[in-house]
Image (cartoon, rainbow, N blue to C red):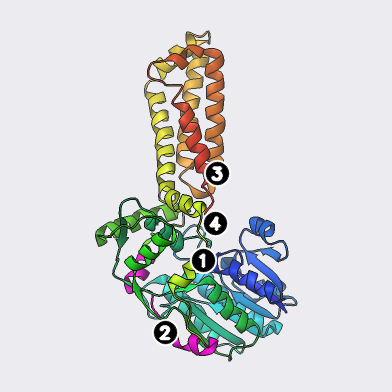
Amino acid sequence: MKVLVLGGYGLIGEAVLGRLIEDGHDLVGLGRDVRDARRRKPDVEWTAADMSRLLAAADWAPLLAGVEAVVNAAGALQDGPRDHLDAIHRRSVAALVTACEQAGVGRLVQISAIGADLDSGNAFFRTKAEGDRAVASSSLDWTILRPGLVIAPGAYGGTALLRALAAFPWFVPAVLADRPIQTVSVAEVAEAVSRAVGGCLARGQIIDLVEERARPLGAVLLEFRAWLGLSKAPVVAVPAIVGRLAGMVADGLGRLGWRSPLRSAALVALEKGVTGNPKPWTQIAGRPPQPLEATLAAMPTHVQERWFARLWLLKPVVFAILSMFWLVSSVVGFVRHDAAADILVSRGLSPAFALGMVLAGSAVDIVVGVAVLVRYLARTALLAMVAITLLYLAAAGLLAPDLWLDPLGAMVKAVPTLCLALVALAILEER
């Protein structure tokens, strides 16, 4: 069977692709940027498309040629420069449903979310529910799956944050530590999708995918800490106001393209708790969904997991320090341009040329210091930082080698800054 998987390189979508490949299906994956996905899963036919722009049935028609089933594993947490919830969750899904009916695509599996509710004040849950309604009102053979907190070997968004908090030194910080959470293994979600695509589920079901027992968020974090192989540490409840402030900062970063799981929408979702009804899936599968302990036990943990967990919270610090360094450097260059130019003049450059170099360098410092804070410009800005620093070191070595012996270490300090930019490049990717 030819199956189209929307969001095929995401946390859930990639696991679904793997399972459907094992089942022998022909897979087409769809996402906004599929370059890395093509390298990771070359057996899948990849199509680059932005769901938020596929808002009419005619937009979907070319993508559905020969397709017999569709799995929608796409979604976004909050509105931002790249994400438009109403377009992705509601309008695009409604257009997809119509296109499937017109093209004769018989089967549609919609991966929704626990808490999806038409009356919700949270845009994520409301638009998810509106997409679910479009699916449920169709003539298709449809299934709607609503997973709890999905745990996967890969880490992205909320699951990355769980690892990072669990690896915090000395104690485990947690906002809303007492909120009930029910997890589900990504393999369990892929199993449910496999059954739905294969026609093994009765038509028209909305199924929660959650473990049997809810546990406080603090307990979930402690399970992750044990899984990482770290020493025991107490959970420290962080005041709600700290969480709200973090959410405000994350929302601001979201406008710059950074998709932090700390955004206010995530905190609202967490405040409600992540709980569902495991009984329907237990009856279908003939067994209860595996608990968090079993999910983690099935995921080998090695040093790379600890590296990732410890680096994740440091990532925004690294970018903030780099931005601050380059912006402060530019301000100093502008304020003390005469002194900086005098150094170059003493090495044989003309006063006008020396002053021009100082002012141009300070202007470039401002540009890269600001650009590194914008997600889609960050890689270019980091590469520019590396190139500028190397050029600066080379020029200083030729024109003023004595500066390397400056007692304040002005030249020497450029080397760790260069290294920090290289570290930022190494950890830039989000998934």
Task: For mark 4, give the secondary structure.
Answer: loop
Residue 392: percent from the left, percent from the top?
53, 23
> Mark 2 highlights which residue?
277
Q: Which residue is mark 4?
A: 431
* Marks 2, 1: nearer the viewer: 1
Q: Which disc number belongs to residue 379?
A: 3
Label 3 and label 1: CA atoms lie apart by 27 Å
Q: Sequence-wise, which precedes: disc 2 or disc 1? A: 1
Secondary structure type for disc 1: loop
- Residue 50 versus residue 70 in the image, above or below: above
| Left or right, residue 389 beside residue 221 | right
Tell me the distance, in whole angstroms, between the alpha carbons under discs 1 and 4. 13 Å
* Residue 280 counted in the magenta span: yes
* Disc 1 residue type (three-letter): Ala
Q: Main secondary structure of the magenta part?
A: helix
> Of callouts 4 and 3, which one flags the residue occurring earlier in the amino acid sequence?
3
Give the position of the C terminus as an image quadrant: bottom right
- Could you tell me which residue is drawn at 30 percent across and 59 percent down? 243
Residue corresponding to mark 1: 152
Q: Judging from the image, what secondary structure is the residue with disc 2 in? A: loop
Tell me if I can see residue 7 in this picture. no
Pointer 3 or 1: first along the chain? 1
> Up-down: is 229 above or below 22?
above
Task: Locate residue 347, reporting x and y percent.
Answer: 51, 9
For label 3, the crowd category at 10 Å Cα-Cα, with few meaning under 14, some 14 to 19 and many 20 or more, is some
Q: What's drawn in magenta, residue-wise?
A: 265-286
User: Mark 2 to mark 4: distance in Å?
Assistant: 30 Å
Residue type at the position of mark 3? Arg
